Amino acid sequence: MSTYFAKAADIEHKWYVIDAAGLPLGRLATEAARILRGKHKPIFTPNVDTGDHVIVINADQTLLTGNKLETKVYRTHSGYPGGLKETSYKKLMQTRPERAVEHAIKGMLPHNSLGAQMYGKLKVYRGAEHPHQAQKPEVWNVAWQREGGR
C-alpha cells in the first residue's frame, strides 16, 4: 500500500464559522489554524493546502487569560531607524480586536508561501454579522469547549 498524497483537484474547501465569544485567544487561534491547515481532514498533506475557509465572529469578545491584557505588547516596525511602534493589547482589543485575532492565528501557520495562501482563507469580524452567508458556512464547535473545558 502506498502513501496517499492529496492533489489540488481532489480537495473540497468548506466554510466554517467559529464564535470567539468567551474563548481564550490562544485556544481560538490553535483551532482556527488547525482548520486552515487542514489537519482535521484524513487527506491532510503537509505540502498541499488541504484546509478550509474560516470565519471568526465576535472577535471583540475574546479573552486574554492572566495578566496578558496589561503586559502583552503588539510590535510593528517600519524598517527605518526609530520605526518601532508598540501597542498594548488592552488598546488593541479596544480599537482593532480583529487584528489581534488575525495576528495570533497567522503566527500558528507555516511561515512560507503556503502559509500565506492559508492565511488568505481567514476572515475575522468584530461583531456577530458577516457577509459570507452565500457560502453556507457551518458552525464549528471547539472540541475542548464541548467537553466542558480542560
Image (cartoon, rainbow, N blue to C red):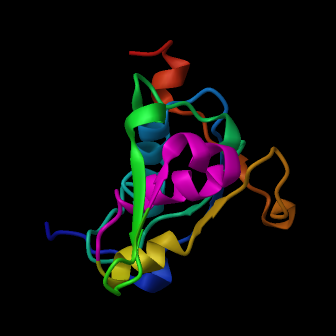
Q: Is residue 50 left or right of residue 45?
A: right
**In the image, residue 42 lies at what x, y percent?**
36, 55
Q: Is residue 7 left or right of residue 141?
A: left
Q: Main secondary structure of the magenta part?
A: helix
Q: Is residue 67 above or below residue 36?
A: above
**In the image, residue 9 lies at what x, y percent?**
48, 85
Q: Which residue occupies 72% across, 42% down?
A: 58
Q: Is residue 78 left or right of residue 5?
A: right
Q: Which residue occupies 44% across, 25% down?
A: 65
**In the image, residue 41 lies at what x, y percent?**
41, 54
Q: Nearer the viewer, residue 148 or 61?
A: 61
**In the image, residue 67 lies at what x, y percent?**
40, 25
Q: Nearer the viewer, residue 140 or 30?
A: 30
**Image quadrant in which you'd find residue 111:** bottom left
**Image quadrant in which you'd find residue 99:** bottom right
Q: Nearer the viewer, residue 47 or 145?
A: 145
Q: Is residue 94 left or right of residue 90?
A: right
Q: Is residue 33 above or below residue 128?
A: below
Give the quadrant of the C terminus: top left
Within the magenta stretch, is there residue 129?
A: no
Within the magenta stretch, is there residue 109?
A: yes
Q: Is residue 51 above or below residue 100?
A: below
The total of numbered circles placed on residues is 0
Image: magenta residue range: 86-111
Q: Nearer the viewer, residue 62 or 85?
A: 85
Q: What is the residue that sits farthest to the top in this orientation?
A: 148
Give the quadrant of the N terminus: bottom left
Q: What is the residue that sits farthest to the front in this orientation?
A: 82
Q: Is residue 76 above or below residue 18?
A: below
